[in-house]
Image (cartoon, grey):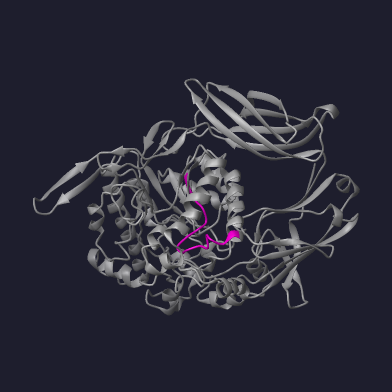
Amino acid sequence: MIHQTLNGTWSFRQTAQTQTFPAVVPGCVHTDLFANQLLVDPFFRDQEKEQKWVGETDWTYHRTFEVNAALLAHEQVLLKFHGLDTIATIHLNGQRLGETENMFRVYEFDVKPHLQLGENSIQVDFRSPMQFVREMDATLGEMAGWIEPMRVNSGAWIRKEPCNFGWDWGPKMPTVGIWREVELIAFSGARLQHVHILQDHQPSAVQLTLHVSAEVLQATPLAVNVVVRLNGETFAQSQADLQTEGNTTLQLILARPRLWWVNGLGEQPLYDVSVELLDPAHATLLDTLAKRIGLRVLQLETPNDEWGQAMYFTCNGVRFFAKGANWIPASPYPAEPTRDHLEVFVRATAQANMNMLRVWGGGIYEDEHFYDLCDEYGIAIWQDFMFACGTYPSTHAEWMANVAEEAVQNVRRIRHHASLAVWCGNNEIEQGMMIPAWEQTVSWDEYNLLFVDLLGQIVATHDPQRRYWQASPHSPGNVRDPFDQTVGDTHLWAVWHGKEPFEWYRTRQDRFCSEFGFQSFPEPATLNEFTAPEDRNITSYVMEYRQRSAIGNGTIIHYMLDWFRLPNTFESMVWLTQILQGLAMKYAVEHWRRNMPRTMGTLYWQLNDMWGAPSWASVDWRGRWKALHHMAKHFYTPHLISGVADAQSGKATLYM
């Protein structure tokens, strides 16, 4: 088997023009324009406005590459795109291969008939995402959702990162480009497609069952060999014949297993699983596939109890309070974050005594680096499917088929990770269905087609050892009340959006709080990167422009007047907003931790940013900890002592 990368240097141009410029793949048109000095820095002051035309434009990427005789000698050669953003047409040597319509899918094309020895050319033509979504809205009907001023389109008709169109903490920057790797894959005989690893935990051993699937080109006796190692030492090995249709099942016993635990409960040993596809008759290794797993049982539990229906997670049978935050994409440019960049934030999560992150449904399914890091640091993952804050066309058969393939691919890709705790259907759509316009666009039965039937069945089929939670927030048995305190998870925004005092949190007896938050400004070092000296006033044009919450800066001042005297310098104001933010979250989290076991989880909004701006983040986009994150290290400490004052009696009650 040969893997020939097509990453690296490409050229790009506006499709309607002839002049080309160098580009880098993986990447996107924004970063390529910026590198060629064709775009001003959209992160400085209000220069985001200067890039609006990018998402309104069609773009073409092109490169040439060499193919040798060894590659062409294989029975099959595939062109594999790991991520195209988003509506694209691919040509190879002038021959049209096909179209893509989903940023979250992997696409493969059979290209052996079109390749030639020596130089070949490939071209990818991208349609303007903004023109596409407007055309779909006009021809098939707009879908209800929270759009302006938060975002420029609901994105319902395009399977693309929702917050690309804007959010109330980020820029409006619809991207285009080859955002993940692209390669040629040449093979003969057969290749591995995917492996599903199931765990059965016994008193002193773990049994692994591996379902292996391969694509077989010819009826030749083949075998699969599996080796499991820990720190280079072999712990188990098994071999089985591959069935004619390309499937086989193997079982291995791991004696004296070292268990994986979430952060704070134990260590995170990770076993390497190597799968080899063999042609015994010719003593040939055809293909290999590697996975890294943790031996654990990580589950969402919802038993009935004296307060209604509990909601908590267990790791290896140990119930734990979920301590964490919500994760958004680390950059507006989806190809930009590296492993080192992501590690800054995952490490900060663990250092603040957190054990869970919710990968929010308005972003992307993160790449392997993110999940690997969460495995290593013991950060359990609540994984949303990428649907947020709007209705979706669940009665459109072609659209649903596209989503089904997206879901299957990503469930198969992520399911082996030790950190993955639960799959969730969407963000805040059940809450939004209380708005008449939403329910008039999509009925509850139509909602269920996507978020109960389709996604629920895909998880049950392809990852049966994980729970599926159909929405966040979600109240089982009472979906029309997303604020039910007896069941499910809640998103609580009466503090901030509702102007309730911080003390309001203490009136809530929720089972699991998966969103709540309060804003602050990033520290002066970060602010100075995107402002000029004359902008450094909380009411300046640039500071107001950068604030994407409709009630933003005024709401911060509203609460500040309840707690503090107004600072007399801009820098003091900036730092004090961070302390105010930390106090809000401290009030909430300490209350709910005192409320254990009735409340068993708090995931505040949000951990991180994707640009420099006032937001709900506790770590700014440069990785600098805000006061909230330092305070989280204390209110998420394993052993928490907190007090509740009673003004009338003049006494305080201490809790441990």
| Rendered residue at 73%/72% (across/down) | 13
Q: Which of 250 and 81 is in front in this view?
A: 250
In this view, 576 is above or below 607 = below
| Rendered residue at 23%/57% (across/down) | 503
Q: Nearer the viewer, residue 476 or 343?
A: 476
Whether residue 406 is in magenta: the answer is no
What count of labels does the image hold?
A: 0
Q: Quadrant of the C terminus?
A: top left
Q: Which of 396 and 587 is in front in this view?
A: 396
User: Image check: 537 left or right of 178?
Assistant: left
Query: Can residue 427 be seen here?
Result: no
In the rendered image, residue 202, in percent from the top left (x then y), is placed at 49, 23
Whether residue 392 is in magenta: the answer is yes
Q: Which region shows up in magenta? A: 381-397
In the rendered image, residue 158, in percent from the top left (x then y), is placed at 58, 64
Q: In which quarter of the image is residue 193?
A: top right
User: Image check: 34 left or right of 381?
Assistant: right
Residue furthest left as drawn: 649
In the rendered image, residue 388, in percent from the top left (x then y), is placed at 47, 60
Q: In which quarter of the image is residue 306?
A: top left
Q: Which of 208 and 329 is in front in this view?
A: 208
Q: Quadrant of the N terminus?
A: top right
User: Image check: 104 left or right of 518?
Assistant: right
User: Image check: 9 left or right of 578?
Assistant: right
Query: Can residue 369 be seen here?
Result: yes
In the rendered image, residue 77, in percent from the top left (x then y), is placed at 81, 49
**Magenta region, main secondary structure:** loop
